[in-house]
Image: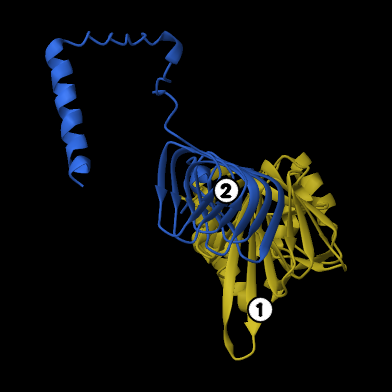
Chain colours: A blue, B yellow
Amino acid sequence: MFKETPANNETETIIGPSVKIEGDFITEGNIIVEGMVCGTIKTSRDLRVGSKSKIFANVSAENVLIAGEVQGNIRVKEKLELTSTAKIYGDIKTNILIIASGSVLNGKCQMGDGKNKTPKPNFSKQEKIELKARPAATDEDEELESMIKTETKSPRAKT
Amino acid sequence: MYYYIYDSFLNDKKYHSLLAKIENRLTDLGINGKINHLSFLKNIQQILAEEIRRGVKTVVVVGSDKTLGQIINLIMDLNVVIGYIPIHSECIAGLLNIPQGEHACDVLSARIVKRIDLGKVNNYYFIGAIETGGQKLTFECDGNYIINLTNKDNIINIGNLNYQHGIFASPNDECLDLFIENTEKKFLIKKKATLSHLTFKKIRLSAEKPMPILLMDEKKILKTPVEIKVQPKKLRMIVGRGSL
């Protein structure tokens, strides 16, 4: 009926809407939050936050789907998905981010797996741009300039 | 060497034919042994200790889950393997793949011994589950977090070997399973039940007022506050093929 396998990791922790948890909630399995959690949530697997749930905690998980309210920093190893009802007040760090229209995100966002860092522009090493000196004006140019000046002045003279 | 403990309800005439079938089957399989009937007048713990000193290695409980729960508390300090012959269809027997009646003799004969976890509530061991209800309950889990239940109409089930809401509480995962079922009752509105499920090793359950806690195995009632913890691999039990 049930085998001696490490199936413990597959067990889901469900925090129902009638439950309020205070403290450090650390597990190895998947977590579904429909109630309220204050403190810390940490799991090596997935986390799903229901639309009516409220979390006042720092969150750390493999993959996270948020439909409720989270006040705290979120650290996700792989994918963070925010549905249209999600509200986040805190910084997020994730590899992949999906944001639905209507969701609220107030905080800093850092993306990528951290391996391929984008090079920062270093202005101190940039080569100086030499501005070319203006060539000396020739006689033809002077004549052209005088012609333009006379043409522009002539309509005023007629009036 | 096998030692059989019969529950007191088996003294009833209607069970005589069934017991005769069981005893015949045990003799056929060559695993028959001394039989003792439970009664108020006997000190079973003392009798068991004497029999184990004489060389009994396996104690077989013949009766119900309640009988098994009682005997487990008596043999915890004695180094024996426990077997089980359920007379009726029982919850624990079903989860351990032990058929009822004389068919359970074949499971005993196959002798698949597994070490399984037990739950301990204050000083009582339990193999199945405990149940309580009420509101304004506080659970302190593993010393890390606190669960507060403020709503009314909660049914709390803490299981070691149990099957609740499609989730198995396995007795070899070295933790207990906490199920909290809350039913919102509103006038003229359909009831809506919500479920919470958590696992833990140690929990302290307290309430504003002393609440009764029912040990499902023994049908015994304790009162809050209580400390419930898992006792990993505490019991050696003969189980059915394919279980655990």
- Residue A141, compared with residue B41, is above or below; it is above
* Letter of the chain that mark 1 sits on in the rendering: B
Residue displayed at 60% across by 63% down: A16
**Neighbours of disc 1 within 10 Å: few (<14), some (14-19), many (20+):** few
Which of A26/A72 is in front? A72
Looking at the rendering, which quadrant does residue B56 occupy? Answer: top right
Determine the CA span between mark 1 and mark 2: 28 Å
- Nearest to N terminus: mark 1 or mark 2: 1
**Neighbours of disc 2 within 10 Å: few (<14), some (14-19), many (20+):** many
Q: Amino acid at mark 1?
A: Lys
- Relative to A149, B104 lies left or right: right
Under tag 1, what secondary structure? helix
- Relative to B59, A106 lies left or right: left
Which of B104/A85 is in front? A85
Residue where numbered disc 2 is placed: B238
Looking at the rendering, which quadrant does residue A73 occupy? Answer: top right
Residue displayed at 27% across by 9% down: A132
Closer to the eye: label 1 or 2? 2
Residue where numbered disc 1 is placed: B13
Residue A76 position within the rendered picture, expressed as x and y whole percent measured from the top left:
50, 39
